Image (cartoon, rainbow, N blue to C red):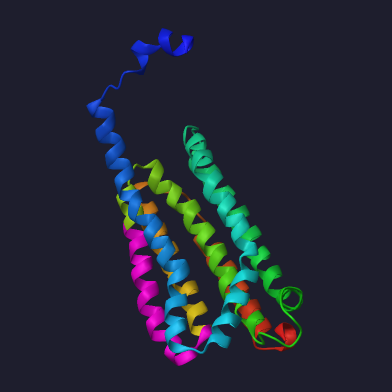
Amino acid sequence: VFGLAMCRSQLLPALHKRAARMLLAFGIPLIPIGIANTIVIASDRYFLREFVDPTEAATFSLGFKIATIVSLVTMALQTAWAPTAFRIAKRDDARRILADTFRILAVGLGMLALATSLCSPELARIFAPAGSYEGAQRIVPWIAFSYALQAAVLMMNANLIIANRTILSTAVFCMGAFTKLVLTAAFIPSFGITGAAAATLVTFLLEILLTAAFSAWVYPVPYDARRFTALIILLALASWAMTWTDALS
């Protein structure tokens, strides 16, 4: 009480118009991002409920939960990367450091997704009774690599925030949400639960392409596009080989 009494003159509200305008211009475009991310991650459940039977939907849910092992890293990056990138941006060699860090983390995330996919049969047996939810492990590679791509999107998106172009971030994530709805509605009737998982992966591929394009426009970072593309192709081939052989059975 004594402290509040001593500081009462500093506790009175004061509006700094210039700071308020900057905060609103920066922050308001970020509001739709949370809604868009929710649509990308959760919208397929509503379509599955309409187009597949409950057993298949439960199988998808199990595979999705196993793949969320990768999301633990994604959530950590989402929390830590933006402030870290802001600190790096103050350095003279910031763009090179951002590119090097992205390359290292992209390889690590890809390896984590691949390892999660390879271990999915054992993980499925741990989380579900033997003989139940057959096929859940075949969903894991799609979702695991989706989360790895999501982390890459978040890392590149920091470049747009550094450049104070949050409106471009909003455009990327809203486009991703729209794409996910369209692809999910198109894929699930034809491909079932695999179509739902594939729609998620394609959505994040679109988001990373859009984010990379916008980043090259407003805050160019010398990413090694050829190596990153080669990494995606190699991981996709490895995932395909596991999915269509006995590795995930």
Residue with the most extreme bottom position: 190
User: Which residue is painted at 42% across and 47% down in the image?
Assistant: 159
Q: Main secondary structure of the magenta part?
A: helix
Residue with the most extreme front position: 1
Residue with the most extreme left position: 17
Residue 77 appears anywhere in the view: yes
- Between residues 130 and 221, which one lies in front from this camera angle? 130
158 relative to 240 in the view: left or right:
left
Residue 204 appears anywhere in the view: no
Q: Is residue 186 above or below residue 110?
A: below
Q: Position of residue 195 (x, y in %)?
A: 49, 84
User: Which residue is painted at 47% across and 82% down in the image?
Assistant: 48
Q: Is residue 143 magenta?
A: no
User: Which residue is painted at 24% across and 34% down in the image?
Assistant: 21
Q: Is residue 96 above or below residue 112?
A: above
Q: Is residue 46 above or below residue 116?
A: below
Q: Is residue 177 magenta?
A: yes
Instruction: Locate the C terminus by quadrant.
Output: bottom right
117 relative to 102 in the view: left or right:
right
Q: Quadrant of residue 214?
A: bottom left
Q: Is residue 79 above or below residue 152?
A: above
| Count of labels in the image | 0
Q: Position of residue 205 (x, y in %)?
A: 46, 69
Q: Quadrant of residue 8?
A: top left
- Magenta extent: 171-193
Q: Position of residue 90 (x, y in %)?
A: 47, 32
Q: Position of residue 220 (x, y in %)?
A: 41, 48
